[in-house]
Image (spheres, rainbow, N blue to C red):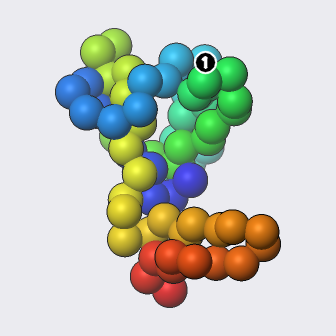
Amino acid sequence: PEYVSMSATDGIPARIVRIEDVGRHRILRAEVAGAALNVILPEGAEVGTDMTRVRFDPSRVNVYVNDWCIKGGAA
């Protein structure tokens, strides 16, 4: 969840369920296509009502097929 961000214009449509302020960061609880998704945001990060899309950092995405990593992001 550290390499996910919110956007108003691009990414995957998401519904924000709630935002929790836990001190050093905020946890945004969202729903994407019926599945729960948690996003860790830096402390003080603004989340506007128009930010209804999630973006994943492509350099940090791993793709698995049959339990084998076929594309790994940065370590």
Circle 1 residue: 17
Horizontal and vertical percent position of residue 56: 41, 51
Q: Residue furthest bottom?
A: 75
- Is 67 in front, or is 8? 67
Tell me the crowding category of disc 1: few under 14, some 14 to 19, or many 20 or more residues within 10 angstroms, Cα based: few
Q: Residue furthest top?
A: 49
Horizontal and vertical percent position of residue 66: 77, 69
Amino acid type at circle 1 is Val
- Quarter-of-image position of residue 28: top right
Q: Which residue occupies 60% across, 24% down? A: 33
Q: Is residue 43 visible?
A: no
Q: Which residue occupies 64% across, 78% down? A: 69
Q: Residue furthest right?
A: 67
- Quarter-of-image position of residue 58: bottom left
Q: Which residue occupies 45% across, 69% down? A: 60
Vertical comparison of 49 with 42: above or below? above
- Is 40 in front, or is 75? 75
Horizontal and vertical percent position of residue 65: 69, 67
- Is 7 in front, or is 68? 68
- Quarter-of-image position of residue 63: bottom right
Vertical comparison of 63 with 74: above or below? above
Horizontal and vertical percent position of residue 29: 61, 30
Vertical comparison of 6 with 18: above or below? below
Q: Which residue occupies 51% across, 79% down? A: 72
Q: Secondary structure at mark 1?
A: strand
- Is 40 in front, or is 7? 7
Left or right placement of residue 29 versus residue 6 in this view: right
Q: Is residue 26 visible?
A: yes
Q: Residue furthest front?
A: 66
